[in-house]
Image (tube, grey):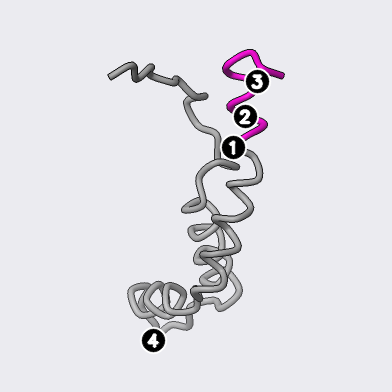
Amino acid sequence: RGYKPLFILPYPPFLNPIEKRWSKIKDHVKRNPLSSLDTLTPRIQAACRSVTTEDCLGWIKHAEGFWDRYLDKELGLA
């Protein structure tokens, strides 16, 4: 079909919106230290619930802003 594989850097976090999600979750957990009666599971669940649709859309848009520049460089078009 004329498809050509495109190899990207092993780990370009700026192209991967999930990295922003994990960052927000980790920050949420860090900002709310565990007391002696707390367990980590409910804290992580609360952190996951704090991620909004708007957060996700913003992270995707942010990553999309890098794709054209990244592909141009990888394909030698820049």
Q: Nearer the viewer, mark 4 or mark 1?
A: 1
Q: 10 Å neighbourhood of mark 1: few (<14), some, or many (≥20)? A: few
Q: Position of residue 34 (x, y in %)?
A: 48, 78
The residue that label 4 is drawn on is: 37
Q: Amino acid at mark 2?
A: Tyr
Along the line of sight, which residue is nearer the eye, 77 or 34?
A: 77
Range of residues picked out in magenta: 67-78
Q: Secondary structure at mark 2?
A: helix
Q: Secondary structure at mark 1?
A: helix
Residue at x-position 49% and y-position 24%: 8
* Vertical order, 67 against 57 (above or below): above
**Which numbered circle lies on residue 73?**
3
Q: Amino acid at mark 1?
A: Trp
The residue that label 1 is drawn on is: 67
Mark toward the start of the polypeptide (4 vs 3): 4
Q: Is residue 11 left or right of residue 67?
A: left
| Furthest residue toward left | 1
| Furthest residue toward front | 1
Mark toward the start of the polypeptide (4 vs 1): 4
Contact flag, marks 3 and 2 (Cβ < 8 Å): yes
Q: Amino acid at mark 3?
A: Lys
Q: Is residue 73 left or right of residue 12?
A: right
Kindly indicate the quadrant of the structure image that contains residue 30.
bottom right
Asked if residue 75 lies in the magenta stretch, the reply is: yes
Contact flag, marks 2 and 1 (Cβ < 8 Å): yes
Along the line of sight, which residue is nearer the eye, 26 or 36?
A: 26
Mark toward the start of the polypeptide (3 vs 1): 1
**Which numbered circle lies on residue 70?**
2
Q: Secondary structure at mark 3?
A: helix
Q: 10 Å neighbourhood of mark 3: few (<14), some, or many (≥20)? A: few
- Give the Cα separation between the discs numbered 4 and 3: 52 Å
- Give the Cα separation between the discs numbered 4 and 2: 47 Å
